[in-house]
Amino acid sequence: MIEKRKYHRVLLSSRTELSQRNGFHLGQLVNISMNGALLRLEFGTYVPKGSEYDLTVYIEGEDIPLQFKTEVVSTTFAMAGVKFVSYVDDTETRLEDLLGNFLETTASKPIDINYPPPADVKKILIEGDRD
């Protein structure tokens, strides 16, 4: 499968609110890039593919949330992938800074050569000791 993404995804767990005129859905950010985000929504929430929502992301330590106009591009039970149609106010600049800082910080960390664990370790972790 050919990767179509232009931007790196960053794992970030922040509170979210996906809203329309007739209501809103609370959730949690799974990951984010400059083009879109993956959201985990409240149990039992389903948002139709192609629907448009306002997305608010509450970043810990930030006074002003990130705000986007979005379109749902993929959906499963309690999960939604959204693409950013437009940014509200200075969200684009703030997101660039946030992602840039995150990528700089993680790029300087050493890589753990034991991750992921070897297959036999995974098997032990999953199946446990059966002797």
Image: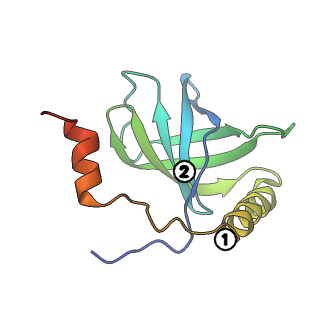
Tell me the mark number nearer the camera, choosing from 2 and 1.
1
Give the residue at mark 1: 107
Q: Any mark on residue 93, and which?
A: none
Mark 1, Cα crowd under 10 Å, few <14 / some 14-19 / many 20+, is few
Q: Residue at x 60, y 40 (%)?
A: 13
Q: Position of residue 116 (x, y in %)?
A: 39, 59
- Give the image location of residue 8, x and y in percent: 56, 68
Q: Looking at the image, which residue is at 55% across and 61% down?
A: 9
> CB atoms at circles 2 and 1 under 8 Å apart?
no
Residue pushed farthest bottom? 2
Q: CA distance from mark 2 to mark 1?
A: 17 Å
| Image vertical order of residue 90 relative to residue 42, above or below | below
The kind of residue on which mark 1 rests is Ala
Outermost residue, front side: 131
Q: Name the residue type under label 2.
A: Asn
Location of the N terminus (image quadrant): bottom left
Could you tell me which secondary element the residue under label 1 belongs to?
A: helix
Location of residue 93 in the rendering, given as x and y in whole percent from the top left corner: 80, 62
Which residue sits furthest right? Answer: 63
Q: From the viewer's perspective, is 70 left or right of 3?
A: right
Query: In this figure, what is the number of numbered marks?
Result: 2
Quadrant in which residue 64 is drawn: top right
Point out the image quarter for the C terminus.
top left
Indicate left or right for 61 with 127 as reference.
Answer: right
- Which residue does the image show at 36% across and 21% down from the upper left? 44
Residue at far left of view: 131
Q: Quadrant of residue 36?
A: bottom right
**Viewer-proximal residue, 41 or 89?**
41
- Closest to the observer, 66 or 14: 14
**Residue beneath disc 2:** 31
Q: Between disc 2 and disc 1, whose residue precedes?
A: 2
